[in-house]
Image: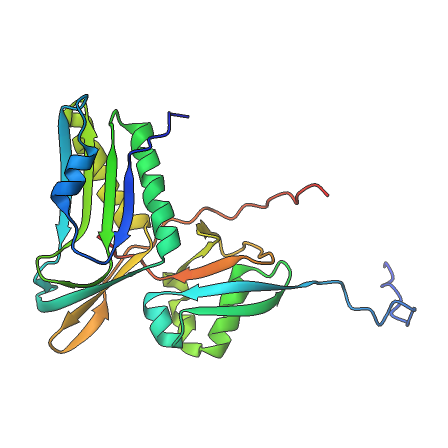
Amino acid sequence: MPLAPPRTAGYNSLVLPVTQAIRVKVLLFGRLKELTGYCEDSIELADATTIERLFALYSARHPELAKYRSSVVASRNQEFAAWETALRAGDEVAFLPPVSGG
Amino acid sequence: MPALPHDDIYQLVREPIDMVALASRVRAPEDGAIVTFDGFVRNQSHNRATLYLDYEAYESMAIAKMREIGDQLHEKYRIHRVAIVHRLGRLEIGETSVFIAVSAPHRAAAFDACRFAIDTLKRTVPIWKKEYFVDGAVWADGELPPVPAATLRAKPAS
């Protein structure tokens, strides 16, 4: 059986894995905006946080958001984006309810 | 890539839409037809009398998506110019919320393109309407835009 790497303290042990903090802009529209009471926010995240995780963070702040997860799509920098998309510094993410223009 | 059309019009406006002016702006001597679509506020929704509608948009993305629709029209159909204009804010019964005009040398392409444009707009452009009734208001049922499947992108070369 392979041995787990020793967890004894080396001099690096106090250094956390290097994850840079990034800031992203978050936009909410339609009923999501009404629910949270704001349409624009800015949040600090670990680099490469996914859109899914970001939505979960907002759902933790506003539990009512969670039930809209399946009827929301996300965009990153004005393009529709998969929930697995990893975010980068300066990204603009929007959570969009079903669209009803026209 | 087709030559970029420079006379197309993509706008979000808060004033009444001047349909006559827009139709004349897509009209050119080499064309033989213009097909227009005028979408306006209906006086009822699901058998409830509507008082008025309020439209909002993710404006920067909505304009980008409207342009994308125009680009698709030029790729798919033999058309000349496109105008797509959507109004935002409070709209009364009968007021035009969306107007599309497509000019072409021949009518078939203009009809097809105009139909494609409104159908795609309703599915992909981030605009929302809230319907106001005597006894309350609701966000209109909408369509969930198609989202690209997750792709595992290679990290940019460092």
Percent of width and height locating residue B13: 25, 54
A3 or B80: nearer the viewer: B80
B61 up-or-down from B52: above or below: above
Q: Quadrant of residue A32?
A: bottom left
Q: Residue at x 44, y 78 (%)?
A: A63
How many marks do you count on the picture?
A: 0
B46 up-or-down from B36: above or below: below
What colouring style does the render use? rainbow
Percent of width and height locating residue B137: 20, 73
Q: Residue at x 60, y 69 (%)?
A: A44
Q: Residue at x 41, y 72 (%)?
A: A65
Q: Quadrant of residue A66?
A: bottom left
Percent of width and height locating residue B7: 29, 34
B19 or B39: nearer the viewer: B19
Q: Quadrant of residue B108?
A: top left
Q: Residue at x 26, y 50 (%)?
A: B122
Figure quadrant of the N terminus of chain A: bottom right
Compared across the picture, whether B18 is left or right of A80 comes to: left
B88 or B142: nearer the viewer: B88
Compared across the picture, whether B11 is left or right of B22 comes to: right
Percent of width and height locating residue B147: 42, 49
